[in-house]
Amino acid sequence: MRAVGRCTAAGSLLLAALAAAPAGAPPAGAAPDAPGAAERRGTEVAAARAAAAGIAFGRCPGAEDLPGSLRCGTVTVPLDYAHPGGERIELTVGRVRATGGDPGGSGRKAARQGALVHLPGGPGASGLYVPLLGLLPEWKRLGAAYDLVGYAPRGVAPSAPLSCQDPEAFVKGPRPAPERPSAAVRRERAAEAGAYARGCAARTGDALRHYHSLDNARDLEVVRAALGERRLTFLGASYGTYVGALYAEMFPGRVRRMVFDSVVNPDPEDIGYRNALARAAAFEGRWTDLKRWIAAHDEVYGLGGTVRRVQRAYRRASARLGAEPAGGTVGPAQLRAAFLRAGYYDDLWPHRTRALSAYLGGDPGPLVEQAGPHPEAAVEAENASAVRTAVECNDGPWPAGLRIWDRDGTRLARRAPFAAWDTVWTYLPCAFWRAPRQRPLDVRTAPGELAPTLILAGERDAVTPYAGARELRRRLAGSVLVTERGTGTHGVAGGPNPCVNGHLEAYLLRGRLPTRDAACAPRPAPEP
């Protein structure tokens, strides 16, 4: 890899040639009016600029609390790839250099393999500090061979951060959480969603339309060039898998190795609304999994020895919180949000269950601590919400009529009451969205077009239901799917399952994939 920041003669010539081309001109051989031609050329211009500039790594934002091995720098990308000479924004990138050690005790140092770029979920999550995963035992081998790299995607602080409302207003007080909200409640939430969408437009202006997944994939190509990597080695988790899938479709020849961990369904018919409804339905299964676990440990928590009794205990707590919020801050909606979050990660189950048990036993402290608002994190939380809303609403079509949302929310709540209406409220601003929508790409690669890729998925993941992994497997020729059976934890790479990690390391370190789709036994259930 070339020295960061050094401009080669070839890079200078390429940059000059691209910059001299007429604005908006398509690449050679492309039809002048081909959809996305201007953006493709703009990406080439931006990547050439970034390759010439490199990244000057130094201290990170908030470095006083971070290990010194993490260094940060910036990469400049166009706000609008169709006009690469126009307004530009900076993405903040974090890197931990490959240690080159001998984590396996083999007596041989790991051969350096370049940069592994890791993009986590969201939209709205930052990958800036993801390189610190290399400090964990499960990541030592990868951290020995690769520079671990992450970045804050566009819109995520400090990369041109988005905001849709005053962060102080974003922290909501205690609210009810009816499974069958009245027409008055639905109207109230629709009014809030409309105000939120107007706030996004007012605070960001015309730039709002440039925060979407297609531009996130183009940004990834520019980051690759800035790192001096001829081809990209990438690990995307959750929403990061969708950005990776778009990258594989748009830049297949630039892929060296690519891991998709917990996959967003890339079917263009599902992007947006249908994926959101599928998640809500899947969360009902995760909620049942959690209730079964609680019932199995009734001797510890005392919430009932059956799923039905645990459900009654939860409803009893919700009703009590509706009458008198815990600590004045935690109502039924906060309780449900806390347990929805537990659907992401099994590790949260003991903590949430202990808090519920303590509350029903007369001690609200743990519940207030876990479910209550955290005003000190309001700016970060509001920023994450703004980015998620902007990207999701921009990425494809959403129903405009509230009648459709009410109809589908009501139907969904009959079979999946736990998450149905929370899902509707989360995405309802898209019904009032004012920015132009993108047309989702039909991600498909032919045999030999893309390097073989690895797909990882938990069978009972609710955040990215398992059907998405199967769909991506079908669309990417040469990909292999490794399934962690019976697991619902969201994100399985680098976790406690040595079988999954063995496949991950074999692929990233040696380029080896299973000859066919494979399965791993589930990870151990959490201890109470």
Image: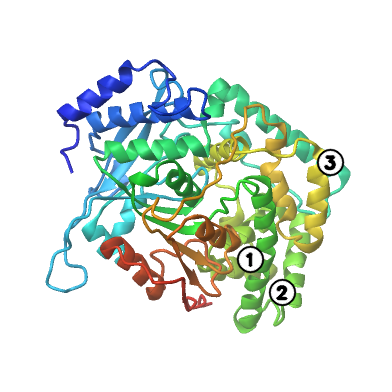
Label 2 neighbour load within 10 Å: few <14, some 14-19, many 20+: many
State yes or no: discs 3 and 2 in contact (Cβ < 8 Å): no
Report the residue marked by disc 1. Answer: 363
Disc 1/disc 2 C-alpha distance (Å): 18 Å
Question: Relative to residue 235, is residue 355 drawn left or right?
Answer: right
Q: Residue at x 64, y 45 (%)?
A: 272
Left or right: residue 13 compared with residue 182: left
Residue ID at (59%, 31%): 164
SS label for mark 2:
helix
Estimate the x, y position of residue 150 in percent, counting from the top left: 35, 46
Badge 3 density bin: few <14, some 14–19, many ≥20, Cα 10 Å: few
Query: CA–CA distance between discs 3 and 1?
Result: 42 Å
Q: Is residue 338 left or right of residue 178?
A: left
- Look at the image and name its color scheme: rainbow
Q: Callout 3, which amino acid?
A: Arg
Q: Residues within 10 Å of mark 1 (few under 14, many from 20)?
A: some
Residue 403, disc? 3
Q: Is residue 231 above or below residue 283?
A: above
Residues at marks 3 and 2, CA–CA distance in whole angstroms = 34 Å
The residue pinned by badge 2 equals 310
Residue 326 visible in the displayed image: no
Instruction: Give the amino acid type for the residue marked by disc 2 in the picture.
Output: Val
User: Which of the two discs, 3 and 1, sits closer to the camera?
Assistant: 3
Please report whichever mark, 1 or 2, sits nearer to the chain's N-terminal start: 2
Name the N-terminal-most of marks 3 and 2: 2
